[in-house]
Amino acid sequence: MTHPPIDVTDAEIDQAVAALRAGQLVAIPTETVYGLAADATNDDAVARVFALKGRPADRPVIVHLGAAEDLSDWAVDIPEYAQAWAEHFWPGPLTLVLQKKEHVSGSITAGQPTVACRVPAHPVALKVLKCLGHALVAPSANRYGQISPTTAEAVHDEFGTEAPMVLNGGPANVGIESTIVACVGPKPVILRAGMITAEALEGVGQVSVDGLQSQASVIAPGQVASHYAPRTRCVWVDDAATLKACLEGISTDLRLGYLGWQAPPQRVAAAEILADEPKRAAQQLYAALRELDRAQLDRILIHAPPKGACWEGIRDRLKRAATPSHKQQVV
Ligand code: TXA
Ligand code: MG
């Protein structure tokens, strides 16, 4: 994965590392979304991440490593296929859930016997990890349940005056969160869809991978139905016929927005049309949702993305955005 030149200075990296050593938080760019980072070996710092995000303590966080070799410091009983994935896909948008080593704090794993690890593919994140010499926990740098930030500006928008230091590494290259795979049962299972598909994993790991659909039997904390959601109420529309019926049922007094792949209906006040190509659409997705959420709309119509495995991560995020939660205004 290539990145445009980054203008984070060495002085900023030093400042970020000093803050992390002092137990403070720093928002870092990764290739997927921005992360709210804390020293993974400092329980107080990890607690600060949960406090700032407003994240429930039963949602474990991902440990970010500087290199695949560090995995054995955090996990045990690593299956051969998982080792092969780590070597092939890292640095990259893949998180492996494995049996944790004894020392790994329950504040990271939410008391579970497993730990989630990945190596992020962003030069700034890797530099911070190298200079710090410790792993980082880094959940997405948004308030709990909100849309993940893909730019430094979006991190500032999320936290306002409470924002920690933010390293600006430019817009995220992948745009949606990493694929999470549980590697602890008889068969690997995808817990969160991302841009690395089951098919890509099967090719490298020489193992069959259970897709997202079959996750019901696996404990997948954080995978609540409503997530990655704008404050504006979103309505899922599967196809042109549903869209038409939906429009007919919504009062003409309401201001509508549209996110999708087709020409927007005439009566919408704001529209975001995403690219036909999944990689580009993933890069655009969260910025488009944030834009519509700022547009003073009563409803956002979300059109289903094209079919196919490469679209699964995007479809999953949009479905969750369109699942009503308490925080969305109901009009
Ligand atoms: O792309 C990403 O993964 C981003 C960037 C910043 O690296 N991070 C991210 O973190 O999305 P967060 O905290 O927003 O999502 C972490 C997900 C949650 O759904 C959590 O439940 C799951 O990882 N997770 C963490 N540890 C787990 C474990 N031991 N077992 C199962 N799921 C776990
Ligand atoms: Mg998140």
Image (cartoon, grey):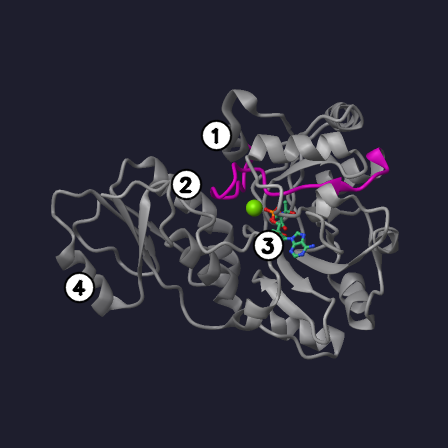
Local packing at callout 4 (Cα closer than 10 Å; few below 14, some 14-19, many 20+) is few
> What amino acid is at disc 2?
Arg
In the rendered image, which residue does mark 1 sit on?
157
Nearer the N terminus, badge 4 or badge 1? 1
Tag 3's secondary structure?
Answer: loop
Local packing at callout 3 (Cα closer than 10 Å; few below 14, some 14-19, many 20+) is few
What distance separates the C-alpha of mark 4 from that of mark 1? 35 Å
Give me the disc on residue 221: 3
Tag 4's secondary structure?
Answer: helix
> What amino acid is at disc 1?
Asp
Q: Which residues are magenta?
A: 132-152
Q: Is residue 165 left or right of residue 161?
A: right
> What amino acid is at disc 4?
Ala
Residue 76 position, x and y percent, is 85, 60
Nearer the N terminus, badge 3 or badge 4? 3
Q: Which numbered disc, 3 or 4, marks the residue closer to the eye?
A: 3
The residue under the point 67% across, 41% down is 138
Give me the disc on residue 290: 2
Location of the C terminus (image quadrant): top left
Q: Which numbered disc, 2 or 4, marks the residue closer to the eye?
A: 4
User: Contact, CB < 8 Å: mark 3 with mark 2?
Assistant: no
In the rendered image, which residue does mark 4 sit on?
245
